Amino acid sequence: MRPEDVLIPEDALTETFLAATGPGGQNVNKVATAVQLRVDLFKLGLHPDAYERLKQIGGSRVTTGGELLITARRFRTQDANRTDARARLAQMIAAAHMVQRKRKATRVPRSAKAERVQDKRQRSAVKQGRGKVTFD
């Protein structure tokens, strides 16, 4: 699933605007341009596996009440920050829908082990030959 294909229900989102730090000059002290997007994970209607993966991806941004908190303050305008927050949410949901393939357990073949030991013995013999020279 691609981030463009993700549909986010509006009733699952709550936006709050706060004063941002960073670029904006004196305007940054007057205008609340940063966006704090709260997403109710239950209202997204995800498959239980995708829900668990989204909680894993969210990490410390997921509250005990089951809300995901995304703060966007990268841009100077409120609209750009809103778009950024929603895009980041869409990326997280798309990533949660991707199922990791199970790792197939493999072993090193016996022949490869034997070859490695043989190479070590050969190298050891070369180094043994570099000992002190005695003139008997």
Image (tube, rainbow, N blue to C red):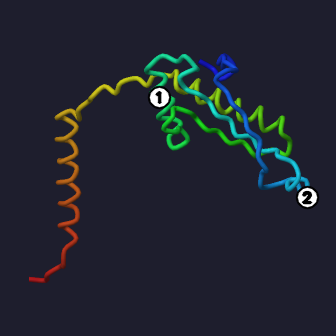
**Is 33 positioned to the left or the right of 6 in the image?**
right
Give the number of the disc on residue 79. Answer: none
Which residue is painted at 73% across and 38% down in the image?
16
The kind of residue tagged 1 is Arg
Quadrant housing the N terminus: top right
- At a point 91% along the width and 53% down the height, the residue shown is 27
The residue carrying pointer 1 sits among few (fewer than 14), some (14 to 19) or many (20 or more) residues within 10 Å by Cα, namely some
Q: Quadrant of the C terminus?
A: bottom left
User: Mark 2 is on which residue type?
Assistant: Gln
Q: Position of residue 134 (x, y in %)?
A: 14, 81
Q: Is residue 36 left or right of residue 64?
A: right
- Is 132 placed left or right of 98 in the picture? left
Q: Which residue is mark 2?
A: 26
The outermost residue toward the front is: 65
Q: Quadrant of residue 78?
A: top right
Using the image, determine if residue 16 lies above or below residue 28. Answer: above
Q: Nearer the viewer, residue 98 or 110?
A: 98
The answer to which of 82 and 108 lies nearer the viewer is 82
Depth check: 84 or 106 in front?
84
Label 2 crowd bin: few (<14), some (14–19), many (20+), radius 10 Å: few
Measure the alpha-carbon separation of dots 2 and 1. 41 Å
- Taking the spot 18% from the left edge, 79% from the top edge, the residue there is 133
Q: Nearer the viewer, mark 2 or mark 1?
A: 2
Query: Do the numbered discs 2 and 1 sit on residues whose CB atoms are within 8 Å?
Result: no
Relative to 120, 37 lies left or right? right
Relative to the observer, which residue lies in front, 127 or 63? 63
The structure residue drawn at horizontal position 48% and vertical position 22%, both measured from the top left corner, is 50
Mark 2, secondary structure of its residue: loop
Instruction: Please state the horizontal and vertical placement of residue 43, each as a whole percent of the image.
Output: 57, 20
Q: Relative to 48, is 103 above or below? A: below
Q: Earlier in the sequence, mark 2 or mark 1?
A: 2
Residue carrying label 1 = 53
